[in-house]
Amino acid sequence: MMPSHSSHQPRKTLQNNLFLYFVLLIVAVISRYPALGNPFIFFDEEFYLFVGGRMLHGDIPYVDVWDRKPIGLFLIYEFFHLFGPYRIWAYQIGALLSAWATSILCMKMARFIAPKTGAFLTGCLYLLWINGAQGIGGQAPVFYNLLITGAMLAIVTFLDQKQTKSLNRTGILVMALFGIAIQIKPTVVFEGIYAGLVLLWMTYQKTKSWSAILVNAFLWCGIALIPTLCVIGFYAGIGHFHDWWFANVSSIFLKQKTPHDSWKTFWHWIHWAVTITLLLLSIMILRALVIKQKPTKVSLIFITGWAWAAFAGFILFGCFSKHYALPLFAPFFINAAPLWQARMGRLWLIILVLWGGQRNLSEIKQARHMGSARDLKQITRLLSSPGGCVFNFGGPDIILDAVPYCPLTRLPFSAHLNSDTEKTALPVDPDTEMRRILALSPRYIIIGEDRSSNAGLNMSTNAILNERIKSAYKEIYRHKQDDENDNIVIFIKQ
């Protein structure tokens, strides 16, 4: 009897949910550990951390520091900034824990339509693929994917339990989670609309009452709008509603299309548009052919619809940079979990794991090329002896967070004054603002990559800056990203 008992022990362990959650944590740590503590992972999150720090000093987003990201994202990074000298580690560990928690929810949802092994691989695939799509740090979807996946899990759980009395509670929970997520990234509205329509359909199925549908529609929409209405109320109360409105609404429609007159930018967009499309199609087609899993189970229909709704948002948004694909991986790989039931499906899942691992390693390598904590310390010392105002035109935004801040402009984000797509969507004329900043004679000027081949560069502000650098500044630092490009060049006023 003892040998039989011991032989079943490994199998029982592998079937234990807590053990699998722990393994997912190990996967999350191992896949992200090489990048932990690196301040130069991606310029977006560098700027979020900078703004979070400015908020602690009393600055108000959209008023004192301008950007169009929702306030919720800056509040998250304001919390991380409380960790002081450990704030970079704090936000990256926070992102790791959020990704891990999301992978657990992916696994739990996949269990409704797939065996446990397939569901576990869903969690692994989510962790690896977000890392390989510039999500190895703290991009916004790394945080709000947790809310969206939790909301969708609540709907699937209700569909499985079929308890009429819990429909209202489910709707309230789902819309509350989406309402918070909207204040992290408004593009979640595509999935929110899908979830809302499904909830209203469930209301009709349970009540057959159009008045119940109308009441729930107003109730749930109102709950989803509460966080945004609170933010609007705050800005209206301090007399800056117009600043909020322009940043969060008007400026979005004023941006110009990203140019693709260089092969590099064109290839990046085409590559990711094709990759994401083929990824979804391969999962759906294989599931239909090798699993022959007919979508008769209502939870499977819902999960399938979620993937297509998220994909539609990705396509309609029209921006195919790889970090915009981060919200897709949870619904995609949850849909892939049933493939474990067939040999061909298992093979494809293993290929996806290996592919995701390769992309993960590539992203770690890219982050290392951008710089290190040691590089940031060297730059900080350089900009502190002597100290003075720093103007960043396309360099890493984390540098502004590492040195004493000098408010030269409301537009400190490196990609605003130097971007051609932004020049018609800013609260000020970029040429006028550039001349005003340079008239203040900042002691240091930081520029980013080799600007001669950057198709998205604002050539007008670039020319104004170049003229000023040539006449009054000298180069004191240069960091090479690779053999061809520099990503940090620093000049000091002569």
Image: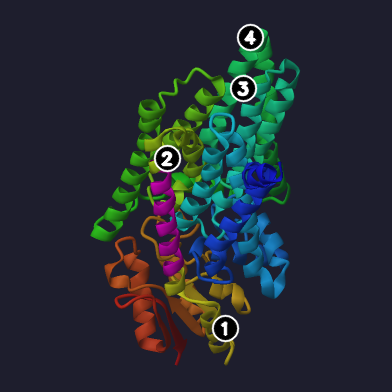
Mark 1: which secondary structure? helix
Q: Quadrant of residue 455?
A: bottom left
Work out which residue is located at the far front of the displayed protein and give it: 1
Q: Which mark is residue 346?
A: 2
Gap in angstroms between the C-alphas marked 2 and 3: 33 Å
- Position in image of residue 306 (x %, y %): 50, 31
The first of marks 2 and 3 along the sequence is 3
Task: Please name which of the two marks, 3 or 4, marks the residue nearer to the observer.
Answer: 3
List the residue tagged with mark 1.
377
Q: Badges 3 and 1: C-beta atoms under 8 Å apart?
A: no
Q: Estimate the spatial distance between the alpha carbons at disc 3 and disc 4, rounded to whole Å.
A: 13 Å
Amino acid tagged 1: Lys
Separation (CA) of disc 2 from disc 4? 45 Å
Image: magenta residue range: 348-366
Q: Nearer the viewer, mark 2 or mark 4?
A: 2
Query: Which residue position is annotated with label 3?
Result: 199
* Residue type (three-letter) at the residue carrying disc 2: Arg
**Distance CA(mark 3)–CA(mark 1):** 52 Å
- Is 96 positioned to the left or the right of 275 in the image? right
Earlier-in-chain disc, 3 versus 1: 3
Q: Nearer the viewer, residue 178 or 229?
A: 178
Closer to the observer: label 2 or label 3? 2
